[in-house]
Image (tube, helix red, strand yellow):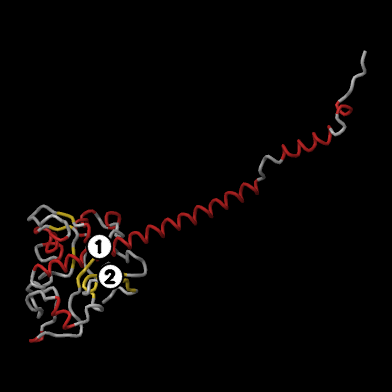
């Protein structure tokens, strides 16, 4: 009979190889500290990516707001071109996005500009919505109570031209103020040329962001929708951001 050969004799390095294999096998499992470190790194990466997505969303909403104001400016310019240079009016300062004669009457900028903003003409009781008249950063359905949804607004008109007066002491309203007892303001809207003679169109705003921190009334966002700035449309029809929301 042949002599039996054990594993050590067949392969002198058998034990050392087996030991190294066992060590490698043992290291395939992660320690608790390693798992926690990986989780922490993943949490940091997720938070950074979420911040990046949020920043992109904020910028996109601001870009859409600026586009809205430019569209409103273009519509005002087209309206003036069709009406002998006269801006829309008379109208009140608030600019509702939802409109009907029963809801807010005829004296609102939205009604004058429907034909220039691809919006439906005003009807007596059936309300219509004009997207260009509401800042997309204002999520009014999550902010306002349902009974105020049709009053949601995020833009307003300049009330008067500062630093100037009209003959007879009238306070100059570029849009013309609907006749109000006891209010000495012009009721007829001005022409763009007249506005340019009274003030500098490049530094005098026509339409601006509005919220509860800068304006009164219902339908407004309780806080600035763009954080630290407000967008404004000026009478030369450029749009710029300002660090203050008040006139």
Residue designated by label 1: 68
- Compared with 5, 139 (above or below) is below
- Whole-percent x and y of residue 119? 15, 56
For disc 1, the neighbor class at 10 Å (few under 14, some 14 to 19, many from 20) is many
Secondary element type, mark 1: helix
In the image, farthest residue toward the front? 81
In which quadrant of the rendered view does residue 19 lie?
top right
User: Going by the image, does 69 lie left or right of 226?
Assistant: left
Residue designated by label 2: 239
Q: How many discs appear? A: 2
As drawn, the label of residue 78 is none
User: Going by the image, does 217 lie left or right of 39?
Assistant: left
Contact between labelled residues 2 and 1, with CB atoms less than 8 Å apart: no
In which quadrant of the rendered view does residue 237 lie?
bottom left
Closer to us: 221 or 7: 7
User: Going by the image, does 234 lie left or right of 125?
Assistant: right
- Whole-percent x and y of residue 171? 13, 81
In whole angstroms, how far apart are the C-alphas of marks 1 and 2? Answer: 10 Å
């Amino acid at each position: 009979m042949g002599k039996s050969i054990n594993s050590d004799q067949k392969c002198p390095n058998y034990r050392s190889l087996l030991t190294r294999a066992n060590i490698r096998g043992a290291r395939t499992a992660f320690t608790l500290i390693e798992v926690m470190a990986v989780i922490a790194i993943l949490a940091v990466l997720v938070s950074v990516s979420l911040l990046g997505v949020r920043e992109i969303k904020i910028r996109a909403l601001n870009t859409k707001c600026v586009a809205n104001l430019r569209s409103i400016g273009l519509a005002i310019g087209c309206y003036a071109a069709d009406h002998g240079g006269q801006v829309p009016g008379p109208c009140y300062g608030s600019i509702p996005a939802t409109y009907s004669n029963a809801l807010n009457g005829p004296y609102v900028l939205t009604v004058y500009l429907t034909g220039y903003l691809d919006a439906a003409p005003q009807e007596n009781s059936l309300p219509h919505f004009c997207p260009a008249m509401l800042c997309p950063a204002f999520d009014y359905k999550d902010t306002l109570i349902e009974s105020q949804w049709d009053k949601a607004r995020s833009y307003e008109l300049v009330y008067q031209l500062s630093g100037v007066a009209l003959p007879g002491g009238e306070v100059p309203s570029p849009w013309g103020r609907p006749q109000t007892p006891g209010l000495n303001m012009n009721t007829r809207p001005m022409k763009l040329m007249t506005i340019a003679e009274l003030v500098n169109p490049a530094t005098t705003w026509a339409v601006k962001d509005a919220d509860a921190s800068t304006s009164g009334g219902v339908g407004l966002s309780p806080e600035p929708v763009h954080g630290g700035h407000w967008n404004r449309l000026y009478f030369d029809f450029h749009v710029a951001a300002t660090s203050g929301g008040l006139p």
